[in-house]
Structure formats: structure tokens, C-alpha cells
Image (cartoon, grey):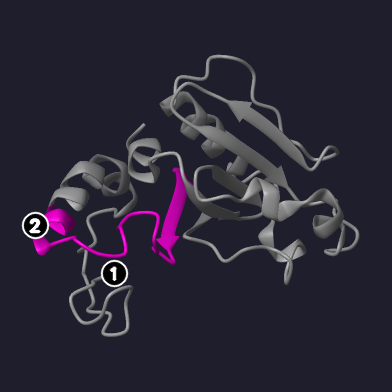
Amino acid sequence: RALATALAGRGVVYLEGDLGAGKTTLTRGILRGYGHTGAVKSPTYTLVEPYELADATVYHFDLYRLTDPEELELLGIRDYCRPDTLSVIEWPGHGHPFLPPADLTITIRAIPDGRELRLSNLNKVFWPQEGYTKGDLVAYYWNVADLIGPYLHERPLTMKRMPDGIDGPSFYE
């Protein structure tokens, strides 16, 4: 639910990981965060499964069986990945160069006692292009701490300054 809240029902999220890593399960959790109570199946053969929810329109893509990335153009990928929708894309490597850039990439890896998630490519999904402050950044991390905390395994969380970030020197990753 914390991830659904942070995404605010918009953006492009890439999910990376081996078969069975939990990409569809994570998508199910995101959809539950928006109030979806029905089944969530992997769109392996249909490529995309739409979810029209009260708080968000979510498109769940699974590109594992995509034979040619150009098929995404025929599918109308740009019509799905609009600023007012959330597109969750499994196996994004199968769709390049026809996919829009990710606002967030989540890499899932199975470990002996569960799953390890690495969040990277934090982009416009979390911050407007202007008007955010350091206080907004602290508030954001405070809100998602419960989400990312279990995956740190007592490792320190560090923030590095991104001088060429979305609005210059005050953005951190």
C-alpha cells in the first residue's frame, strides 16, 4: 500500500527479475493498494491487463513472450503510458527501444529468507518538476520507510546527491 500511495496512480514502473521472482505478486500488491479486490493474473499472453479503479487506471504489462519490440507500437503503447495512468511493466528489456523511460525500476531477487527489492531510477513519479523541498523529501522517505526498511537487512540507508537530478543540485537519490 505504501508503494501504491507513493506512485499516486501515475508513471511507468519497470519490474525486473527472474521467472518466479515475484513481479506479478508485487503488481497484485500495488493494485490492492488502490482497492482492487479481484484476481490479478499475469498478462503473459495478452501482453496487457487494464484495471480501471476508483483512484487509478493501471495497466499491467508482461512482455516475456513479446517476439518483436515493434509490436508495442502496433499495440499503441503510447496510448497506455499517459501522464494520468500507471503502467507496470514486467520484462521491460523485451520492449526496448519502444517503451517510455521508467520513472521507477524495481529489481526483485529471491534470497534464502524471502525477496530482495532494489528501487532505482527514481524519477518524476515521486516529485513534481518544481515546488518540492528538502522537507518533502524527508516526509516521502518517512512514509515509505515501512516499505523499504525490511529489505535493508540492517544495512545503512545512504542518500547520494544527484547534481543533475530532476531540478538540479537539491535532488537526492
The kind of residue on which mark 1 rests is: Glu
Residue 154, above or below 161: above
Where does the image place residue 39, in percent across and percent down from the top left? 64, 18
Q: CA distance from mark 1 to mark 2?
A: 15 Å
The quarter of the displayed image where residue 147 is located? top left
Left or right relative to 25: residue 70 = right
Whether residue 95 is visible, yes or no, is yes
Which residue sits at x=42%, y=27%?
33
Left or right relative to 2: residue 92 = right
Q: Secondary structure at mark 1?
A: loop
Whether pointer 1 and pointer 2 mark residues with C-beta atoms closer than 8 Å, the reply is: no
In the image, 167 versus 6, the foreground residue is 167
Q: Residues within 10 Å of mark 1 (few under 14, many from 20)?
A: some
Q: Which residue is mark 1?
A: 173
Whether residue 111 is visible, yes or no, is no
Which residue sits at x=25%, y=64%?
130
Residue 43 included in the magenta stretch of the image: no
N-terminal of the pair, mark 1 or mark 2, is 2
In the image, 4 versus 64, the foreground residue is 4
Q: Which residue is mark 2?
A: 135
**Outermost residue toward the bottom?**
163
In the image, 118 versus 137, the foreground residue is 137
Left or right relative to 98: residue 164 = left
Label count reads 2
Quarter of the rendering occupied by the C terminus: bottom left
Residue 106, above or below 144: below
Left or right relative to 38: residue 54 = left
Which residue sits at x=20%, y=42%?
143
Q: Which residues are magenta?
A: 109-138
Where does the image place residue 7, in percent across and percent down from the top left? 40, 44
Where does the image place residue 36, in percent across and percent down from the top left? 52, 20
The kind of residue on which mark 2 rests is: Gly
